[in-house]
Image: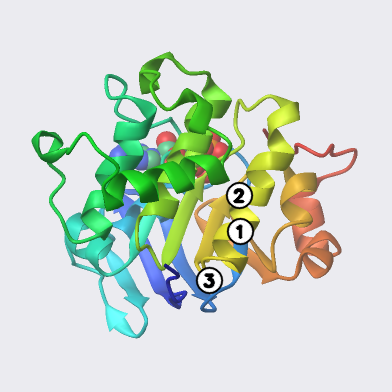
């Protein structure tokens, strides 16, 4: 199954909380099928932007459009049905379910069934086959019977990617998918993310502090600073942008700036 990537447009998005400006006039146009990175210092508003796009917080100004459809006030489930999937900065698997069950729930829903655990047939039904296929893609099939809460942090991030692969998401938001992942696991995760774009045709928007890894992966980068986007361009142009240099990357920055 392959999904067609969605175009995401964020227009003049603003969020004020108790007099504080968390998001300020954010504009972004993410082309269908592209892979875009979001960088910026801690507290810049990256996760909040994802929360506004996925419906967890309600913006106080502006609009969010998915394939030209205004989803600014749509519920979280309605956005998921429209093809929006996401992972969270902190791992969000069901810890007491097995690795396989976590993916099979997503597979059941995308195959048109319910998300009920009670409906799990024991055999090799379509949802199980789809789930096993996605676990193999991320290299977790050998841990399929482990409780998801018992696997390592890097494996949990892989599991989240497998869950997204098993859905029909046409756009995914990944919030720091490589945070806390052992360096040996990073290349595999990078390949999984690339596959979401290339094989599945998904649009991918990802926050990541590992700038060196991100720059080799994405088509474009958005730089957030104090709730605003101060640059949105190719990795090469962003790295050479004078405003980005002075505001964010600074002098003597390392490959994991502001992590
Ligand atoms: N519900 C809220 N109420 C008040 N302030 C909030 C709320 N949510 C976020 N903030 C503030 O908004 C700012 C942006 O936070 P956010 O988590 O989006 O940053 P971030 O760029 O994801 O940072 P990090 O790189 O550390 O994950 C922070 O100053 C945070 O304290
Ligand atoms: Mg964050």
Q: Label 2 vs label 1: CA separation?
A: 5 Å
| Whole-percent x, y for residue 169 in the image | 37, 62
Q: Which residue is labeled 1 in the image?
A: 195
Secondary structure beneath disc 2? helix
The colour scheme is: rainbow
Q: Which residue is labeled 2 in the image?
A: 192
| Whole-percent x, y for residue 57 in the image | 26, 51
Identify which residue is drawn at 73% across, 41% down.
187
Q: Pointers 2 and 1 in contact (CB under 8 A)?
A: yes
148 or 235: nearer the eye?
148
Asked whether residue 18 appears in the rendered view, the answer is: no
Q: Which mark is residue 35?
A: none
| Whole-percent x, y for residue 120 in the image | 17, 38
Picture quadrant where residue 60 is located: bottom left
Quadrant where the N terminus is found in the figure: bottom left
Q: Label 3 vs label 2: CA separation?
A: 12 Å
Picture quadrant where residue 238 is located: bottom right
* Left or right: 89, with 79 as reference point: right
Quadrant where the C terminus is found in the figure: top right
Up/down of 173 relative to 200, above or below: above
Q: Looking at the image, is mark 3 or mark 2 earlier in the sequence? A: 2
Q: Which residue is labeled 3 in the image?
A: 201
Identify which residue is drawn at 16% across, 45% down.
115
Q: Pointers 3 and 2 in contact (CB under 8 A)?
A: no
Secondary structure beneath disc 3? loop
- Residue that lies at the very extreme toward the left in this rendered image: 118
Q: Label 1 vs label 3: CA separation?
A: 8 Å
| Whole-percent x, y for residue 197 in the image | 58, 65
């Amino acid at each position: 199954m392959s999904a067609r990537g969605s175009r995401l447009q964020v227009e003049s998005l603003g969020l004020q909380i108790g007099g504080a400006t968390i998001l300020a006039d954010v504009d972004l146009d993410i082309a269908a099928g592209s892979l875009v990175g979001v960088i910026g210092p801690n507290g810049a508003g990256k996760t909040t932007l994802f929360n506004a796009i996925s419906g967890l917080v309600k913006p106080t100004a502006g609009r969010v459009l998915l394939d030209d459809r205004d989803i600014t006030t749509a519920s979280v489930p309605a956005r998921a049905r429209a093809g929006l999937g996401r992972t969270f900065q902190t791992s969000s698997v069901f810890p007491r379910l097995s690795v396989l069950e976590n993916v099979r729930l997503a597979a059941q829903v995308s195959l048109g069934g319910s998300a009920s655990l009670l409906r799990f047939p024991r055999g090799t039904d379509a949802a199980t086959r789809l789930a096993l296929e996605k676990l193999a893609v991320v290299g977790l099939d050998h841990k399929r019977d482990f409780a998801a809460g018992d696997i390592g942090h890097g494996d949990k991030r892989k599991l989240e990617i497998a869950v997204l692969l098993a859905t029909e998401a046409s756009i995914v938001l990944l919030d720091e998918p490589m945070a806390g992942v052992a360096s040996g696991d990073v290349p595999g995760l990078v390949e999984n993310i690339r596959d979401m774009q290339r094989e599945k045709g998904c649009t991918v928007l990802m926050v990541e502090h590992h700038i060196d890894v991100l720059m080799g992966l994405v088509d474009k980068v958005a730089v957030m600073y104090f709730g605003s986007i101060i640059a949105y361009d190719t990795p090469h142009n962003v790295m050479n942008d004078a405003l980005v240099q002075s505001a964010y990357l600074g002098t003597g920055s390392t490959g994991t700036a502001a992590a």
